[in-house]
Image: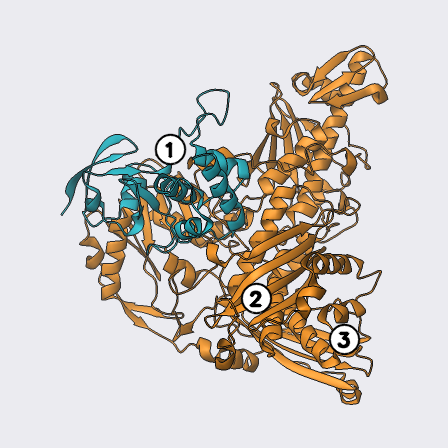
Chain colours: A orange, B cyan
């Protein structure tokens, strides 16, 4: 998959978020599909957890290359001392996977969460469970780990029953022990693991319908379990990838082009050598420096840059980007096939929305430590894609994948921006040339320039209304940013939606909810314009178009948010420069709705209050889920109001936190976050969908305050709107 | 030309010989292996590099090493041992760390050390801060996970506990 191909990204992420994903096994594994395979390891018991859904499916989509082998979701090891280790290919970047997967194993093993040790994303130790993206860990990895752990529990029960000569039905598992209540006998996981021969004798495919603990009996899941390494976070002891060290380690820094597409013509290598300890590494267009300190490496690269001569190429600028994208679609944009319906409609509207390029800007920039041992390299890396990055590094360095080990310590924020291995490739190349371990930590400027971006979008929407204010036709085309959530959840007989890929001048890739942010912004903002045209209240207009069965989950979050916010009361209230707006949306099997109040203060839009309701099936960890929801909401305020990559002649003009303004404490509105728990539904991921509703709700509130609809992200007020101050700002 | 600098870090006398212009952040991380203080922007705008110098908050990424000669620097590592000394985990934490732990006031945690250091400094200056004083103190620190509401709860909790 190339990251430039949004269709591929979306396909991948959709597959990852599919609650019943497709998997297949290589030829060697035929005949042992559709089972959880148990095997006895040298010391203790190793349980390899394979996805159950695989049978008959023929599409291997784990992107990390597991080779021809089997796709494995996790491994569970029980040591002879009873130590329980779960090995997973998932990563922890702050979203909570470490906690959630620990809970999942603990729940089914019948042990407290602190007895489970989770080993994440070390390509030499863990199975390839694909990329950590697309809200996939919750619907896919959690059930897999639960099934494996439940199989282990079943093994403990069978073992105990056999030892005691009792029926398995009389054996319970409590607090990590098999218990026979009638005779007060107990047996531990340590005893099971110690008796490997016995365990082996019991080795068999787990029953296909391995029984998982019902939601109402959950003890570990459904609880606000704390992050297992929380103490190391608050003491500063946790080592992020950028904190890694190795004996003799040097610091690496790359020479970067002054603009996109620029080619190096000339360079004076002596410039770098003038800095004590600095060594130039040059392999064709790859030019970097290693030095004993970051400071020396920076000075050496700065000195080199002074001597560099570049050949530049013409590049589009941000002030004409939307015209550029419209003119550079790969295929002609389809016309509205319902033009006749629009012409015949009692009322019709047509609007264009634009969304700027933005960036994830995780606080920890791309970082990697590479250390060679013979012909093999180990790379500690900030990534959501450990196996994919292993492959990327091995390709870049001409190695076999087996000669690259990627380890992902819990890192400083992902948000979809960490699918690639840039710093890892650079560190590995520099370390190979230097003959010493090398740490590369990108600067903020590098991150803002050379990492990838959430794609800009141009969105055209057109719809017709009949005399009763009911939608008759719908047309929605997204140019450049993707097709996620492009389908309307609202009932309309004739709907045409399409994504049109374009040549993006900036490098683009995933982001929280990706195009669902743009598509939902445009659709929900347009819905308020339609409601106004129909003379309807925005809430009532939406509810009138949401099916009571198919749209029940979306209706529930919307109605709950409106009630908690006192939508009707606040909407009626007239206060100069103040408005309220709402928006809803569904994506990746979860639903969100938010009501906001904004005020125009000193010419700026201030979000004063937000009530967001979110539903993603059965809640696995309420505290973590709440954090994800308010984190998404606040993060989403940035692109709604301020964030926008500005670029000219191939250079980013605002590649710093002083010029690219992300949300701060003062931007946090008064929040009412409410989770709708649905224990009857499978749990869906929650790190993305809660971000898709805040921007359109703000737009709608500004529309309410000023009487003028918003058509771009970030939003801009007209001059006269800026003066429509809130009464008590 | 390198210079020799004497200063106190987390109560311990340290001597380093470095370029006087080298940022304090790099000296802490690369010479003293105190990696709890982070790089975030290199321009003093995100707060990830905040340490206390003679009790005052300082952006160590834009602070030349030579400027702390003879001064006392406190980093996150100086607040509490990184491992509990006894089985009673949590007992050794600084009250502000304990408050952040109790509130689970982090997602990725990369900004957590400086959110804690900022709160320590705030509560030393102002033991009973108002909401406005808290906002003024913390607003310079970025949390890209935007876990701000929980961080504010932790700051309030620490203030109430007399952190």
Disc 3 packing (10 Å; few <14; some 14–19; many ≥20)? some
Disc 2 is placed on an element classified as strand
In the image: residue A510, left or right of residue B94: right
Question: How far from the left and from the top, in percent, is residue A282?
Answer: 31, 57
State which quadrant residue A439 falls in.
top left
Question: How far from the left and from the top, in percent, is residue A516?
Answer: 63, 64
> What is the CA distance from the residue labelled 2 to the residue labelled 1?
41 Å
Disc 2 packing (10 Å; few <14; some 14–19; many ≥20)? many
Q: Residue at x 53, y 58 (%)?
A: A635
In the rendered structure, the residue with mark 3 lies on which chain? A
Whether B97 is drawn above or below A589: the answer is above
Whether B84 is drawn above or below A501: the answer is above
Residue receiving disc 3: A495
A238, A624: nearer the viewer: A624
Disc 1 packing (10 Å; few <14; some 14–19; many ≥20)? many
> What is the CA distance from the residue labelled 3 to the residue labelled 2?
32 Å
Question: How far from the left and from the top, in percent, is residue B148?
Answer: 51, 50
Query: Could you confirm whether marks 3 and 2 are on the same chain?
Result: yes
Of pointers 3 and 2, the one earlier in the residue sequence: 3
Q: Are marks 1 and 3 in contact (CB under 8 Å)?
A: no
Please identify the residue farthest to the top as the structure is shown.
A183
Q: Which one is closest to the eye, mark 2 or mark 1?
A: 2
Question: How far from the left and from the top, in percent, is residue A543?
Answer: 78, 67
Residue receiving disc 1: B79
In the image: residue A90, left or right of residue A646: right
Residue receiving disc 2: A598
A208, A118: nearer the viewer: A118
Q: Residue at x 42, y 76 (%)?
A: A315
Q: Which one is closest to the eye, mark 1 or mark 3?
A: 1
In the rendered structure, the residue with mark 2 lies on which chain? A
Q: Are marks 2 and 1 in contact (CB under 8 Å)?
A: no
């Amino acid at each position: 998959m190339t990251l430039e191909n949004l269709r591929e990204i979306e396909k991948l992420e959709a597959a990852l978020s599919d609650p019943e994903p497709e998997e297949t096994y290589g030829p060697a594994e035929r005949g042992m599909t559709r089972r959880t395979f148990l095997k006895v390891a040298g010391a203790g018991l190793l349980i390899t957890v394979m996805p159950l859904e695989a049978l008959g499916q023929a599409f291997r989509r784990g992107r990390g290359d597991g080779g021809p082998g089997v796709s494995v979701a996790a491994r569970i090891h029980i040591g002879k001392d009873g130590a329980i280790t779960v090995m997973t290919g998932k990563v922890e970047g702050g979203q909570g996977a470490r906690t959630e997967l620990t809970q999942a194993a603990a729940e089914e093993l019948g042990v407290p969460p602190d007895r489970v040790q989770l080993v994440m994303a070390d390509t030499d130790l863990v199975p390839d469970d694909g990329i950590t993206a697309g809200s996939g860990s919750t619907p896919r990895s959690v059930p897999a780990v639960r099934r494996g752990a439940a199989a282990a529990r079943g093994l403990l029960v069978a073992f105990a029953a056999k030892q005691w000569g009792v029926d398995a039905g009389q054996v319970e598992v409590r607090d990590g022990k098999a218990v026979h209540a009638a005779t007060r006998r107990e047996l531990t996981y340590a005893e099971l693991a110690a008796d490997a021969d016995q365990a082996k004798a019991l080795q068999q495919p787990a029953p296909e319908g391995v029984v998982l603990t019902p939601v109402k009996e959950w003890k570990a899941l459904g609880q606000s379990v704390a992050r297992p390494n929380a103490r190391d976070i608050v003491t500063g002891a946790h080592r992020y990838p950028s904190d890694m060290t190795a004996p003799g380690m040097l610091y690496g820094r790359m020479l970067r082009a002054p603009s996109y597409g620029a080619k190096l013509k000339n360079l004076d290598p002596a410039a770098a050598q003038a800095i004590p300890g600095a060594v130039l590494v040059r392999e064709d267009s790859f030019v970097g420096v290693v030095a004993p300190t970051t400071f020396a490496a920076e000075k050496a690269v700065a000195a080199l840059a002074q001597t560099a001569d570049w050949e530049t190429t013409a590049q589009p600028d941000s002030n004409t980007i939307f015209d550029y994208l419209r003119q550079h679609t790969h295929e002609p944009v389809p016309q509205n096939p319902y033009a006749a319906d629009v012409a015949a409609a009692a009322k019709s509207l047509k609007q264009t929305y634009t969304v700027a390029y933005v960036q994830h800007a995780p606080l920890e920039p791309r970082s990697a430590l590479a250390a060679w041992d013979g012909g093999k390299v180990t790379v500690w890396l900030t990534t959501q894609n450990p196996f994919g990055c292993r492959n990327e590094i091995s390709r870049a360095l001409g190695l076999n994948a087996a000669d690259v080990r990627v380890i992902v310590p819990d890192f400083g924020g992902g948000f979809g921006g960490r699918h690639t291995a840039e710093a890892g490739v650079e560190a590995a190349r520099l370390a190979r040339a230097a003959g010493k371990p090398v740490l590369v930590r990108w600067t903020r400027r590098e991150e803002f320039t050379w990492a990838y971006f959430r794609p800009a979008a141009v969105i055209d929407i057109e719809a017709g209304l009949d005399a009763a204010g009911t939608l008759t036709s719908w047309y929605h085309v997204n140019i450049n940013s993707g097709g996620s959530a492009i389908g309307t959840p609202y009932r309309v007989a004739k709907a045409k939606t399409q994504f049109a890929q374009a040549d993006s001048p900036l490098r683009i890739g995933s982001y929280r909810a990706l195009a669902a942010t743009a598509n939902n912004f445009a659709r929900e903002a347009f819905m308020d314009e339609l409601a106004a045209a129909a003379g309807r209240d925005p809430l009532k207009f939406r509810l009138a178009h949401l099916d009571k069965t198919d749209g029940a989950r979306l209706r529930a979050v919307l109605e709950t948010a409106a009630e908690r916010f006192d939508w009707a009361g606040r909407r009626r209230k007239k206060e100069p420069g103040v408005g309220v707006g709402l928006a809803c949306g569904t994506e990746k099997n979860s639903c969100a709705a938010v009501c906001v109040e904004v005020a125009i203060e000193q010419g700026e839009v201030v979000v004063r209050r937000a009530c967001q309701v979110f539903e993603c099936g059965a809640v696995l960890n309420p505290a973590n889920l709440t954090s994800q929801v308010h984190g998404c909401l606040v993060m989403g305020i940035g692109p709604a109001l301020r964030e926008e990559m500005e670029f000219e002649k191939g250079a980013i003009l605002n590649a710093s936190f002083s010029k690219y303004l992300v949300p701060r404490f003062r931007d946090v509105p008064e929040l009412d976050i409410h989770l709708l728990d649905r224990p009857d539904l499978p749990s869906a991921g929650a790190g993305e969908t809660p971000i898709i509703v805040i921007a359109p709700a703000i737009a709608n509130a500004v529309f309410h305050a000023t009487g003028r609809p918003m058509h771009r992200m970030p939003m801009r007020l007209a001059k006269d709107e800026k003066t429509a101050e809130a009464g008590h700002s | 030309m390198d210079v020799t600098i004497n200063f106190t870090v987390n109560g311990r006398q340290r001597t380093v010989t470095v370029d006087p212009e080298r940022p304090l952040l790099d000296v802490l991380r690369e010479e003293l292996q105190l990696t709890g203080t982070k790089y975030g922007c290199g321009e003093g705008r995100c707060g990830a590099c905040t340490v206390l110098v003679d009790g005052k908050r300082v952006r160590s990424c834009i602070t030349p090493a030579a400027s702390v000669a003879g001064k006392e620097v406190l980093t996150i590592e100086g607040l509490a041992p990184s491992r509990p000394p006894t089985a009673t985990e949590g007992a050794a934490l600084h009250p502000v760390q304990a408050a952040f732990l109790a509130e689970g006031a982090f997602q990725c945690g990369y900004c957590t050390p400086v959110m804690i250091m900022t709160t320590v400094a705030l509560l030393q200056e102002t033991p009973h801060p108002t909401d406005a004083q808290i906002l003024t103190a913390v607003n310079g620190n970025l949390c890209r996970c935007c876990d701000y509401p929980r961080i504010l709860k932790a700051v309030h909790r620490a203030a109430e506990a007399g952190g």
